[in-house]
Image (cartoon, rainbow, N blue to C red):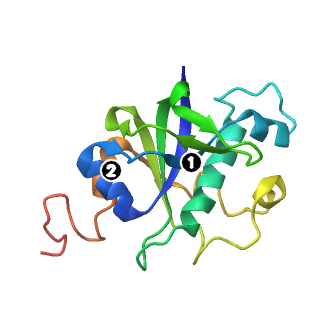
Amino acid sequence: MSVRVYLPVTAAGLRSWLAGDLAGPEPLSGHAVTRELALDYDRPDAADDDEPLRLEALTDAALASAALERAPGDDERVAVLEVESDDVTLRPGEGSSIRVTVAVPRANWVAGYLGPWWPASAPEGLSGAEGRSEVTSLSGDDLGWHGVQELDDALLPPGVTAAGASLTD
């Protein structure tokens, strides 16, 4: 059985993963729909594919991504992967927080979300169910979703094509 996980990553980290066709090295910190997250939202019978809880796990990953050290102008990134449940460990007391204990091949990647979601870094003090309810700017329209096949091009600087030519040439 697999688990959908949301991994915060920098653009440099995502480029490295794409170049090696492997998300890693392990362990990787991330977020997923966990029993603890479901209980935070009074949804004890929720499944891994519960869409509102997936958005909460994605939001947690986006907040974690915003807190990562990265180069100026490097917006938030979240990689979405399907990982065997035996390769995911829970982090009790930390809501949606998980660890992936193996490097994950590109064949198991689902998509990537590329920011920006906030003007600078994540708002301070946002954690737990109370904090997540304050993230009002995060919606499907704000989340630059990209299929795995689009990620290489999505990480290129504006105005540059995959072949390396400028769109203004």
Tell me the quadrant of the picture where the C terminus can be found.
bottom left
Counting labels gives: 2
Q: Which residue is mark 1?
A: 30
The reply, left or right, for residue 36 in relation to residue 88 is right
The residue lying at 69 percent from left, 72 percent from top is 123
The reply, left or right, for residue 97 in relation to residue 6 is right
- Amino acid, disc 2: Trp
Q: Which residue is mark 2?
A: 17
- Amino acid, disc 1: Gly
The residue lying at 76 percent from left, 28 percent from top is 46
Q: Is label 2 in a helix, a strand or a loop?
A: helix
Query: Image quadrant of residue 105?
Result: top left
Residue 75 in the image: state x and y as whole percent: 47, 69
Where 54 sits versus 83, above or below?
below
Tell me the quadrant of the picture where the N terminus can be found.
top right
Residue 25 in the image: state x and y as whole percent: 38, 48
Where 37 sits versus 120, above or below?
above
**Mark 2–mark 1 distance (CA, rounded to whole Å):** 15 Å
* Disc on the earlier residue, 2 or 1: 2
